[in-house]
Amino acid sequence: MTNWTLVLPFIGYLLCLLGFGYVASTKLDDLSDYLLGGRTIGSGVTALTLQATSMSGFMFMGGPALAFNQGLWALWYAAGDFGGGLVNLAVLGRNLRRVTEALGSLTPIEWLEDRYMHVSVRIAGATIAIVFLAAYVFAQFIAAGKAIESVSGLPFLYGLTIGAGIIVLYTFVGGYLAVAWTDAFQAIVMAIGINIILIAGILEVGGPGALINELAAKDPTYLSIWGKGLVHAGEWGVVAGAVLIYSIGYMGLPHSVVRHLSMKDPDTAKGAAIWNVFYNTFFVYQPYILGLVAIVVLPNLSDPEMAIPRLATSLLPGILAAVILAALMAAVMSTADSLLIMAGSILARDVIQRFAADDLSDNQMFVWSRLLVLTIGVVGVVVAAVQPPGIFDLVVFAFGGLGTAFLVPNVAGVYWDRANWQGALAAMIGGAGTNIIWTVQDLQAVSAVHPFFAGLIASTLLMVVVTLITEPPTGQAISIVQRARRADTAPQGTVQQSARSLAPEARAIGTYLAVDDGASPTATGNPAVNARPADD
């Protein structure tokens, strides 16, 4: 039976999100506005949208399920996640923002081609990104359907259709600006909701000490750093992967990296880092602790991914349970909308516009990007209706694939001038391929090495070895990256304007070289693409 006490407040919440989308749509003037919000996003919104888009339905379903099954071992993931956003902003934030504006890059995949100056990097990057982003979207849609089904009583397919439909609609209408605004709003809802249920759960079991005692009485290995039954005893390769996947993996996620590109200015990263640490204090560990609470309060729970929804309906009055549902859906939506806009951007900007026979206007790109968002959303609903693997497994697989493919090329592209397209291509394919093989063949069981850790090692080695045995990169992109990076030591006024002032120079150089080679100076509209040498 449908619980309208929960459904009606939730409908109001969804309507608020549509309002964000409509307001954002009135502020779209060009393609940069749709893809990057016009590079106007401040530090608070940057931090909140970065965390909201990274901490998906996994945090309300997959994370608690892992803690329910494995005990304190799950906190290895939380430990890495707590510092993940800070590491991302500190390593890539300012310099990547400055460099991508200097190169004129509008998407994370376009940035890689602009830096490495070879079309194969864009082709491989777009393919890998779309595959893993799609898997990530499917996980979010599954989480939405299961949550609404569990808490409201609506059938899974209804919940799936409602949640996915709203996400697709406001992303379709408002673009990145709508995504950023709704993510910031939903990040606050997520933090409030998770702490409400955490307080109720801790009170129910009699306090933190009582929780530890109850867990020890049920099975002492729940309190082990190696997992229930000591299943991961001595497997430091698995532990390293569990910590690293969220502590450094964000630097490889296209939908996280794009947050750097959209910042108002490079110094926005400083304020965002402070906001990030503050927010994580009130959100990162709580879902895993609730998984431990569920072991005690809901010992017969058949589906551990339903731990938080079940705790909400059993411990809280209807209106507060509705807040928890809204928080759970906020986690799902804030990631799914970013995945959709990122996948649509990659398909439109990095595939269709890049390889179109004729130049496409911004208006045409609006249409293509929105159609692709709609298409991906519809396909995601269809696939999610079949209910593929569990949310935890699907998210870790997708997250790991994206991280192992793009983390090393992103960091090397900013800081290692010797890095070339051959090394970047090998790192992307090798990293993602290793993650896939390790997961599909369950090599973690025989090697005691986490798929992400294995993929990261493969990606790093391939980047270094292949780069060093091939020719150094040439072209104006390297000098532009160097100058944008060095702007960090310039006076304050120069720093604020440096990246923006480099963009016209890059475009002028690209146009000059393209004309000199007999090519059309408007072939791509991107300076570094125009300036790249012939593909070989």
Image (cartoon, rainbow, N blue to C red):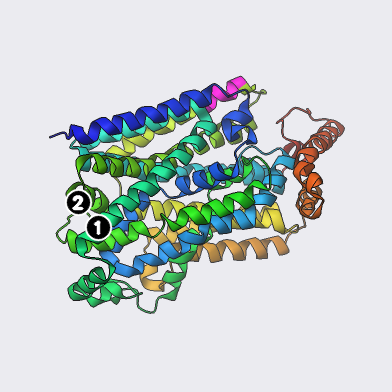
Judge left or right: residue 479 versus residue 291: right
Disc 1 marks a residue whose amino acid type is: Gly
273 left or right, relative to 397: right
The image shows residue 456 at horizontal and vertical percentages of 53, 63
Element under label 2?
helix
Question: What amino acid is at disc 2?
Answer: Leu
Give me the residue at 41% from left, 72% from top. Answer: 447
Residue that lies at the very extreme toward the left in this rendered image:
1
Residue at (21%, 42%) from the top-left corner?
151
Mark pair 2, 1: CA separation: 7 Å
The secondary structure that most of the magenta stretch takes on is helix
Between 89 and 240, the one lying in front of the other is 89
Callouts 2 and 1 close, C-beta under 8 Å: yes
| Residue corresponding to mark 2 | 315
* Rendering coords of residue 110 (x, y %): 64, 40
Residue 93 as seen in the image, left or right of residue 418: left
Q: Nearer the viewer, residue 285 or 143?
A: 285
Q: Position of residue 270 (x, y in %)?
A: 63, 52
Tell me the quadrant of the picture where the N terminus can be found.
Answer: top left
| The magenta segment | 363-369
Residue 5, image quadrant: top left
Q: What residue is drawn where x is 63% and y is 24%?
A: 30
Q: Which residue is at 24% across, 57% downward?
A: 201
Picture layout, residue 9 above or below residue 54: above
User: In the structure shown, which secondary structural element does the residue marked by tag 1 occupy?
Assistant: helix
Q: Which residue is mark 1?
A: 201
User: Nearest the camera: 328 or 433?
Assistant: 328
How many residues crowd mark 1 within 10 Å: few (<14), some (14–19), many (20+)? many
Residue 368 part of the magenta-drawn span: yes
Disc 2 crowd rating (10 Å Cα; few below 14, some 14-19, many 20+) is some
